[in-house]
Image (cartoon, rainbow, N blue to C red):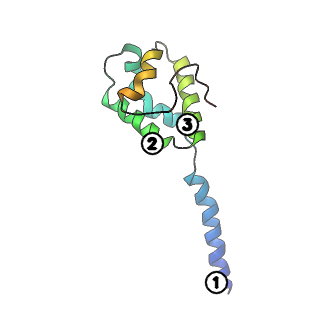
Amino acid sequence: MAGLKLICGLVLLCMLVVEPMATTALTCGQVASQTAGCIRYLQRGGNPPAACCNGVRNLNRQARTTRDRQTACRCLQTAARTISGINAKLAAGLPAKCGVKIPYKISPSTNCN
């Protein structure tokens, strides 16, 4: 009986440790890493490089929850304010150029809430 209690206790402990790790929220570092390949395109135009579109698609896959999408939105807005020369029209059209459909417009004035 003591062995069963020990096993139940270990299973409960594992659930408490693993669950927060499984629901780890998206970070600005991850957003920056996925979109770094897009900076030159967003400044100069042309065609987005493959690394950029791969990052956009990966970011879209990673940002599944409302919280993650809000984080990604805020991170991208902060980056757009910090990196000089970002063309807002190119940024707005980037998801479509990379074959990604999102339910909101990419804009510095987008309400991330």
Who is closer to the viewer here, 33 or 69?
Answer: 69
**Relative to 78, does residue 15 appear above or below in the rendering?**
below
Q: Quadrant of the N terminus?
A: bottom right
Report how far apart the C-alphas of labels 2 and 3 lie in the structure.
10 Å
Q: Position of residue 76 (x, y in %)?
A: 53, 26
* Amino acid under disc 1: Gly
Q: Earlier in the sequence, mark 2 or mark 3?
A: 2
Question: Residue shown at 61%/71% (left/top)?
Answer: 11
- Image location of residue 2, percent across then percent down: 68, 84
Whichever of callouts 1 and 2 sits on the residue coming sooner in the sequence is: 1
Q: How many numbered circles does the render carry? A: 3
Give the SS element for disc 1. Answer: helix
Type of residue at label 3?
Arg
Residue receiving disc 1: 3
Q: Quadrant of residue 38?
A: top left
User: In the rendered view, does 7 fall on the left or right side of 37?
Assistant: right
Amino acid on which disc 2 is placed: Arg
Q: Can you identify the residue that label 3 sits on?
A: 69
Rendered location of residue 30, percent (x, y): 50, 37
Query: In this orientation, which residue lies closer to the viewer: 62 or 4?
Result: 62
**Numbered mark located on residue 61 in the image:** 2
Between disc 3 and disc 1, whose residue precedes?
1
Q: Position of residue 112 (x, y in %)?
A: 61, 29
Q: Nearer the viewer, residue 51 or 47?
A: 47
